[in-house]
Image: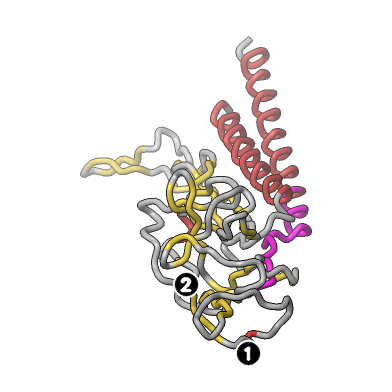
């Protein structure tokens, strides 16, 4: 009976952790490139159950043997094993903003922060007064050659991440009419290429706020991406399915209540054992 209380309590704690993740997913349904979290559980070690038959010992002329038949296993509880990040592709939304970039496939933009290089799939960028391509919280976006400096209407980003600028016959960047096709440019110069990376085990990347991820020993070092495309004028939306999360929330509430009733029943039975049977 006491074991039943502990088992029910562990179930309630696990469902509470699951509810926290569901609530966080719903809160970030409109966050660009947000990747949903899924709670994974594991059970405590099971106990072997045997049916008691008298004293459980069978006697034979040469000795004795265990005569208790095997019944099954008794679960002893559950705990959170991992919060798994699902890096499934989110839908691409057209914005017509040249500073908005979206990735299709596995990969991350590289951003320079006060804590070093971090990685994100949120391509909602802008430029500052010095022409530095940066996130909205002021962190420069990195190319393979370092910080990227561009002009307002004088750059295009190809699907492979190359940053192309329009130049005059002398190779000097010039302003371009908004909406002009890349093929109409007089001189095309590859200024740099976006530093896009991938990881062998991206599931182990650490979330660091502001849609940033940080590498660690489990994720491995950043690697060149395999197949990834960059779309200018698009943003990747969250991969959270609101209907699925609401269904999960109902499931969590019912599981929590079931564990709660288990504790109540075990406590009531234990009370009768102490107050009535013992007398």
- Residue 221 highlighted magenta (yes or no): no
Disc marking residue 216: none
Q: Position of residue 159 (x, y in %)?
A: 57, 79
Task: Identify the residue at the far top of this view.
Answer: 279
Q: Earlier in the sequence, mark 1 or mark 2?
A: 1
Check disc 1 and report the residue beneath it.
Answer: 183
- Residue 246 highlighted magenta (yes or no): yes
Left-right relation of 65 to 131: left
Q: Position of residue 199 (x, y in %)?
A: 43, 64
Foreground residue, 207 or 249? 207
> Where are the magenta residues, as a range?
232-249
Foreground residue, 7 or 223? 223
Q: Position of residue 156 (x, y in %)?
A: 61, 76
In the rendered image of this protein, does residue 80 appear above or below residue 84? above
Left-right relation of 9 to 115: right
Element type where label 2 sits in the image: strand
Question: What colour-coding does the image apply?
Answer: secondary structure
Q: Quadrant of the C terminus?
A: top right
Element type where label 1 sits in the image: helix
Q: Position of residue 190 (x, y in %)?
A: 49, 78
**How many labels were placed on the picture?**
2
Foreground residue, 242 or 153? 153
Check disc 2 and report the residue beneath it.
Answer: 192
Please say whether residue 86 is visible from this viewpoint. Answer: no
Q: Residues within 10 Å of mark 2 (few under 14, many from 20)?
A: many
């Amino acid at each position: 009976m006491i074991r039943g209380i502990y088992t029910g309590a562990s179930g309630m704690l696990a469902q509470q952790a699951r509810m926290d993740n569901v609530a966080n997913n719903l809160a970030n349904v409109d966050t660009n490139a947000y990747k949903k979290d899924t709670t994974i559980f594991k059970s405590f070690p099971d106990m072997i159950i045997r049916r008691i038959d008298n004293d459980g010992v069978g006697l034979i002329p040469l000795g004795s043997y265990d005569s208790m038949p095997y019944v099954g296993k008794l679960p002893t509880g559950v705990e959170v094993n991992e919060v798994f990040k699902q890096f499934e592709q989110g839908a691409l939304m057209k914005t017509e903003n040249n500073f908005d970039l979206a990735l299709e496939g596995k990969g991350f933009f590289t951003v320079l922060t006060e804590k070093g290089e971090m990685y994100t799939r949120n391509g909602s960028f802008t430029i500052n007064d010095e022409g530095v391509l940066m996130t909205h919280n002021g962190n420069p976006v990195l190319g393979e050659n370092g910080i990227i400096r561009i002009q307002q209407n004088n750059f295009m980003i190809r699907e492979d991440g190359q940053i192309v600028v329009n130049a005059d016959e002398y190779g000097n960047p010039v302003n371009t009419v908004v909406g002009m096709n890349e093929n109409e440019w007089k001189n095309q110069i590859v200024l740099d290429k976006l530093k896009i990376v991938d990881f062998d085990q991206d599931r182990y990347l650490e979330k660091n706020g502001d849609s940033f991820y940080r590498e660690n020993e489990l994720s491995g070092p950043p690697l060149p991406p395999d197949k990834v495309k960059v779309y200018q004028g698009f943003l990747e939306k969250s991969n959270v399915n609101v209907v699925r999360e609401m269904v999960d929330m109902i499931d969590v509430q019912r599981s929590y209540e079931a564990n709660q009733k288990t504790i109540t029943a075990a406590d009531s039975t234990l009370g009768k054992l102490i107050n009535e049977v013992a007398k």
